[in-house]
């Protein structure tokens, strides 16, 4: 048998699936199900905004809504296993204690084993990591704390809603090369860049789309920072255009965008709104890929995953008075206190979440702003299934540059913005590669014919 345009390692994987097909019965259409739900998560009160320091946004309270922020959940079920993929129009995923509470609550109410909360990284969303300041009764902070409680309640209800809508489903995906993004940091030649545009679609038994998910990497920093209104930025434009053209609910899964931005005119940055053009261009690319996308019932419905927590030293000493003073000046007392409480011991604990869908699609999520070459390395080294990377997932631990990027320095790679010890990001990618391989091995092992006694 010849499999055109497939690497040898993918040939081996395809042949293993053929072996399974010859030794197992066909999957029941009921064995793979999907449900989707969406909810508006735009704050109704004025709260501190996320994404820029006082240098760009001296007055940091929101003043209204340019376009609404949404959370969208796709719940998948295979046999007795369930996972939830949640796209958030937020600057970062919720802070880690909220992530854990959400996971525990939905595991109890819906039996969902793995949750991926993936922020789009819009810089016009609410700040999520603020903490109370002693002897200070600030209305904006109080509004933010009330919003956190509301957000947690909404996200739990959202995932439960999607789980309540499970129905027999088919699944498929396709990749292309986007023209929307470029590397904003590197001095390397050739320029590191993750050009992949990945489109996932899940349909119901009647062939109607349940949801369409889009994964690519670029900073949503195209709405002027001086406009203090909430906005989903270019991903919101893209999702709206795709839904209008297809009728399919569309969600965005941000990639390794640490050094990636939209390919726009830098001289106009912050002066005019530049989110519409890249959003529309991305939508046209998504629609073109979707035209040729075919979904099918998985041969072996299966969901499994693993989560890892790492311990890395910090490059920035938050106990240093000069460092502390600079952070207080740039980001305020509340945010500094939040970071000091989380990292004051000089150690960070980033998260990596890996899920394998039907033995054929792996999603690896990291809790921060990974540089694009790390995503490229993961995809190149991952054996067997199609693998994608999502950033800003289940927490946020600042920038994750490569060693080479750290050597070059600059924003996103210097100690002021990239706090992780050099080599830490590569260790996380190494673990992601291992996780995918191990999940495939257990998937394969579980489907081998039982040996005769």
Image (cartoon, rainbow, N blue to C red):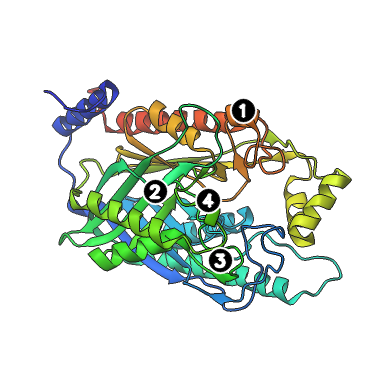
* CB-based contact (under 8 Å), mark 4 and mark 2: no
Residue at the disc numbered 3: 152
Q: Secondary structure at mark 3?
A: helix
Image quadrant holding the C terminus, namely top left
Label 4, label 3: how many angstroms apart (C-alpha)? 36 Å
Q: Residue at x 62, y 41 (%)?
A: 412
Does label 1 or label 4 sit earlier along the sequence? 4
Q: Nearer the viewer, mark 4 or mark 3?
A: 4
Residue at the disc numbered 1: 423
Label 3, label 2: how many angstroms apart (C-alpha)? 33 Å
Q: Position of residue 28 (x, y in %)?
A: 18, 49
Q: Nearer the viewer, mark 3 or mark 1?
A: 1
Give the label on residue 180, or none.
Answer: 2
Res. 73 visible in picture: no
Does label 3 or label 2 sit earlier along the sequence? 3
Give neighbour class at mark 2: few <14, some 14-19, many 20+ (Cα, 10 Å): many
Image quadrant holding the N terminus, namely top left
Does label 4 or label 3 sit earlier along the sequence? 3
Give neighbour class at mark 4: few <14, some 14-19, many 20+ (Cα, 10 Å): few
Of 131 and 293, nearer the camera is: 293
Q: Residue at x 42, y 52 (%)?
A: 253
Tell me how many marks there are: 4
Give neighbour class at mark 3: few <14, some 14-19, many 20+ (Cα, 10 Å): some
Res. 57 visible in picture: yes
Q: Secondary structure at mark 2?
A: loop
Q: Position of residue 231 (x, y in %)?
A: 50, 67
- Name the image quarter holding residue 94: bottom right
Label 4, label 2: how many angstroms apart (C-alpha)? 14 Å
* CB-based contact (under 8 Å), mark 4 and mark 3: no
Q: Residue at x 54, y 59 (%)?
A: 102
Residue at the disc numbered 4: 266
């Amino acid at each position: 048998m010849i499999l055109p345009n497939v690497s040898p390692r993918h040939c081996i994987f395809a042949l293993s699936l053929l072996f399974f097909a010859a030794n197992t019965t066909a999957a029941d259409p009921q064995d793979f199900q999907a449900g989707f739900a969406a909810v508006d998560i735009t704050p109704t009160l004025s709260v501190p905004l996320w994404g820029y320091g006082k240098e760009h946004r001296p007055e940091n309270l929101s003043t209204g809504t340019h376009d609404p922020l949404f959370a969208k959940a796709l719940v998948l079920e295979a046999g007795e296993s369930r996972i939830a993929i949640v796209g958030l129009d937020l600057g970062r995923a919720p802070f880690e204690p909220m992530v854990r509470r959400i996971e525990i609550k939905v595991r109890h109410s819906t039996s969902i084993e793995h949750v991926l909360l993936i922020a789009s990284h819009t810089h016009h969303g609410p700040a999520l990591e603020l903490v109370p300041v002693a002897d200070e009764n600030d209305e904006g902070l109080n509004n933010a704390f009330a919003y956190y409680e509301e957000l947690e309640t909404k996200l739990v209800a959202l995932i439960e809603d999607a789980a309540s809508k499970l129905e027999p489903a088919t699944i498929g995906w396709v990749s292309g090369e986007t023209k929307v993004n470029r590397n904003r940091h590197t001095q390397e030649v050739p320029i590191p860049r993750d050009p992949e545009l990945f489109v996932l679609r899940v349909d119901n038994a009647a062939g109607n789309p349940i949801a369409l998910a889009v994964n690519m990497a670029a900073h949503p920093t195209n709405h002027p920072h001086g406009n203090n209104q909430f906005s989903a930025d270019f991903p919101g434009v893209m999702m709206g255009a795709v839904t209008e053209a297809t009728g399919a609910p569309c969600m965005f899964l941000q990639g390794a965008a640490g050094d990636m931005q939209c390919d726009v005119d830098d001289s106009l940055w912050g002066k005019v709104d530049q989110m519409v053009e890249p959003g529309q261009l991305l939508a046209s690319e998504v629609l073109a890929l979707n035209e040729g996308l075919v979904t099918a019932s998985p041969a072996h419905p299966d969901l499994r995953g693993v989560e890892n927590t790492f311990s890395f030293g910090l490059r920035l000493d938050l106990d240093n008075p000069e460092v502390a003073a600079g952070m207080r000046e740039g980001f305020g007392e509340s945010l500094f206190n939040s970071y000091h409480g989380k990292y004051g011991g000089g150690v960070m604990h980033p998260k990596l979440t890996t899920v394998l869908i039907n033995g054929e699609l792996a999603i690896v999520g990291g809790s921060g702003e990974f540089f694009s070459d790390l995503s490229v390395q993961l995809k190149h080294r991952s054996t067997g299934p199609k693998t994608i990377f999502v950033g800003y997932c289940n927490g946020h631990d600042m920038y994750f540059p490569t060693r080479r990027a750290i050597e070059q320095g600059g924003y996103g790679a210097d100690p002021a913005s990239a706090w992780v010890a050099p080599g830490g990001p590569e260790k996380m990618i190494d673990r992601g590669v291992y996780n995918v391989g191990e999940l495939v091995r257990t998937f394969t092992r579980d489907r081998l014919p039982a040996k005769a006694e």
